[in-house]
């Protein structure tokens, strides 16, 4: 699996959902929350086995020490089909 994530540690609010959906190639997202953390995930956005996610951890989150960050994280991944 190959993936990449970018972080905005200074983010005070999550990225607008409509902006994120524009990057998801029409795939429907699944929004959820874990306490004060919001998570949005999209499956198969760039083909089978790929995904995209957006996680927002508020600056005053009670789990910031456990997660190691606050702010906004955007990430994507895919399964590498290359063979040796």
Image: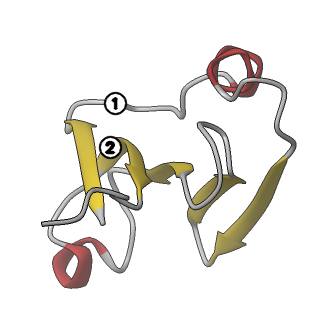
* Lateral position of residue 14 relative to residue 26, left or right: left
Camera-side residue: 37 or 55? 55
Point 37% across, 78% down: residue:
62
Identify the residue at the far front of this view.
Answer: 84
- Counting residues from the start of the chain, the first of labels 2 and 1 encountered is 1
Q: Under tag 2, what secondary structure?
A: strand
In x, y percent, where is residue 39?
Answer: 61, 59
Q: Mark 1 — residue?
A: 11
In x, y percent, where is residue 64?
Answer: 26, 71
Image quadrant in which the C terminus is located: bottom left
* Lateral position of residue 79 relative to residue 45, left or right: left
* Lateral position of residue 79 relative to residue 22, left or right: left
Asked if marks 2 and 1 touch (Cβ < 8 Å), the reply is: yes
Image quadrant in which the N terminus is located: bottom left
Point 40% across, 52% down: residue:
77
Q: Mark 2 — residue?
A: 71
Gap between marks 2 and 1 measured at Cα:
5 Å
Q: Under tag 1, what secondary structure?
A: loop
* Classed neighbour count for the residue bearing mark 2: other residues with Cα under 10 Å, few (<14), some (14–19), many (≥20): many
In this rendering, the count of numbered labels is: 2
């Amino acid at each position: 699996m190959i993936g990449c994530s970018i972080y905005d540690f200074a983010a005070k609010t999550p990225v607008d959902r409509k902006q994120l959906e524009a990057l998801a190639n029409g795939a429907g997202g699944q929004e959820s929350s874990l306490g004060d953390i919001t998570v949005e995930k999209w499956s198969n956005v760039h083909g089978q086995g790929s995904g995209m996610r957006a996680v927002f951890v508020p600056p005053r989150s009670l789990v910031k020490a456990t997660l190691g960050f606050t702010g906004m994280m955007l990430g994507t991944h895919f399964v590498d089909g290359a063979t040796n």
